[in-house]
Amino acid sequence: MLSDSTRVRLLWALLDGERSVNELAEAVKKAPAGVSQHLAKLRLARLVRTRRQANQIFYRIDNSHVRQLVEDAIYHAEHSAGGIPEHHRAKADVSELRRADQ
């Protein structure tokens, strides 16, 4: 499920909380119909849950294990790209991180 960049971006957007299909489509800059197809796959894999309100469906991360999986996958990808990952820049002084990488 994490091999598709759109699905990863959808999951990343859902880390901030519940969103509708249209909000997610806007966040990943894709058509709502295509986003719905990706979300259906994520739901079948039990990575997301749904909630219906009138004629809208809202999606959210299924549980804390999925949240951790998504965060770890993104952080690992940032480390693989080389340099100082963005998530480290917010947590520590960059000069300290450069010394630790050497």
Image: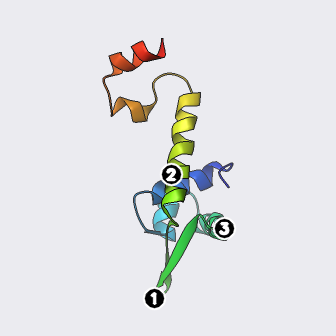
Query: Is residue 28 something one can see in this rendering?
Result: no
- Label 2: state its secondary structure: helix
Residue 19 visible in the current orientation: yes
Between the C-alphas of marks 3 and 1, the distance is 20 Å
Which residue is disc 1 drawn over? 54
Which secondary structure, mark 3?
Answer: helix
Picture layout, residue 83 above or below residue 64: above
User: Which mark is first along the chain, 1 or 2?
Assistant: 1
Q: Which of marks 2 and 1 is in front?
A: 2
Question: In the visual, does 41 lie left or right of 49?
Answer: right
Residue type, numbered disc 2: Gln
* Disc marking residue 37: 3
Q: Mark 2 points at which residue?
A: 68
Q: Which mark is first along the chain, 3 or 2?
A: 3
Residue positioned 57% across, 58% down in the render: 30
Please, what secondary structure does the residue beneath circle 1 have?
A: loop
Q: Position of residue 39 (x, y in %)?
A: 61, 66
Comes first in the chain, label 3 or label 1: 3
Colour convention: rainbow
Q: Residues within 10 Å of mark 2 (few under 14, many from 20)?
A: few
Q: In this view, does 94 lie to the left or right of 50?
A: left
10 Å neighbourhood of mark 3: few (<14), some, or many (≥20)? few
Mark 1 residue crowding within 10 angstroms, few (<14) / some (14–19) / many (20+): few
Along the line of sight, which residue is nearer the eye, 3 or 27? Answer: 3
Q: Quadrant of residue 97?
A: top left
Q: Which of 83 and 30 is in front in this view?
A: 83
Q: Where is residue 63 in the image (x, y as percent from the top left)?
A: 50, 64
Picture quadrant of residue 44: bottom right
* The disc label shown at residue 12, or none: none
Q: Residue 65 location in percent, x, y?
A: 53, 57
Q: In this view, does 86 lie to the left or right of 43?
A: left
Q: Which residue lies furthest to the left in this view?
A: 93
